[in-house]
């Protein structure tokens, strides 16, 4: 009887051991899976964040620039820095400099806005004494309304493929807002840069 008892006890312990190993391994897999899902989900959300629909590319920003009273009625362009809060995939920058524009007051209640970027290769244009514009990089010249001059002051053909880019302006309660966008250089068409 003692041999039978010993055999039964041995048989029970032999069957318990594989069950314990199975439970230990199964528990390790479940716990490891739960622990691994959290960083994997966080990583996936970080990688896919730039694809979220609220981050539309090429979208214009309506940005307050100055007050209408700050623009003189002499019709000469004044340069203003464009500042806005920027949010990219992982960072937020408050009041960042995103560009610059020229504003020209054309009447008591109307303002024209021109980009400071030359459509040829993207250099910044400067104003001349008569209110016209010149690109210092390749001597392109533009009229006071932003239209490209066929020839510059030296008689050379202008290389800019189009007029200076105009931007939409809104005036609200005496404040001048600009719908700021950038456009592709070196193209005859005005194409929003994405």
Image: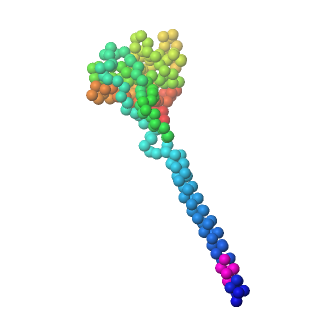
Left or right, 35 with reference to 6: left
**Per the image, is 9 magenta?**
yes
| Above/below status of 88 relative to 187 | below
Front position in the image: 194 or 148 = 194
Residue at coordinates 55% horizontally, 52% vertically from top-left? Answer: 40
Left or right, 133 with reference to 27: left
Furthest-bottom residue in this view: 1
Residue at coordinates 46% horizontally, 36% vertically from top-left? Answer: 92
Assign the N terminus to one quadrant of the image: bottom right
| Above/below status of 108 relative to 85 | above
**Per the image, is 36 magenta?**
no
Is residue 64 in view from this perspective?
A: yes
Left or right, 130 with reference to 151: left
Residue at coordinates 47% horizontally, 30% vertically from top-left? Answer: 183
Predominant secondary structure in magenta?
helix
- The quadrant in which residue 61 appears is top left
- The quadrant in which residue 17 appears is bottom right
Q: Which residues are magenta?
A: 8-13
């Amino acid at each position: 009887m003692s041999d039978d008892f010993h055999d039964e006890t041995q048989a029970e312990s032999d069957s318990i051991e594989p069950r314990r190993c199975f439970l230990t391994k199964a528990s390790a897999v479940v716990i490891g899976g739960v622990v691994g899902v959290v960083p994997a989900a966080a990583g996936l959300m970080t990688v896919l964040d730039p694809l979220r629909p609220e981050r539309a590319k090429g979208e214009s920003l309506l940005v307050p620039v100055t007050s209408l009273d700050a623009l003189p009625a002499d019709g000469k362009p004044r340069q203003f820095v464009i500042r806005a809060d920027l949010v990219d995939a992982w960072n937020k920058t408050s009041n960042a400099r995103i560009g610059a524009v020229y504003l020209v007051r054309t009447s008591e209640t109307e303002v024209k806005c021109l980009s400071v970027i030359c459509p040829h290769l993207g250099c910044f244009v400067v104003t001349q004494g008569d209110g016209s514009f010149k690109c210092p990089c390749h001597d392109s010249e533009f009229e006071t309304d932003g239209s490209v001059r066929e020839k510059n002051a030296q008689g050379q053909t202008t290389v800019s493929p189009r007029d200076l880019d105009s931007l939409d302006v809104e005036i609200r309660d005496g404040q001048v807002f600009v719908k700021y966008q950038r456009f592709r250089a070196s193209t005859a068409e005005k194409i929003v840069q994405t």
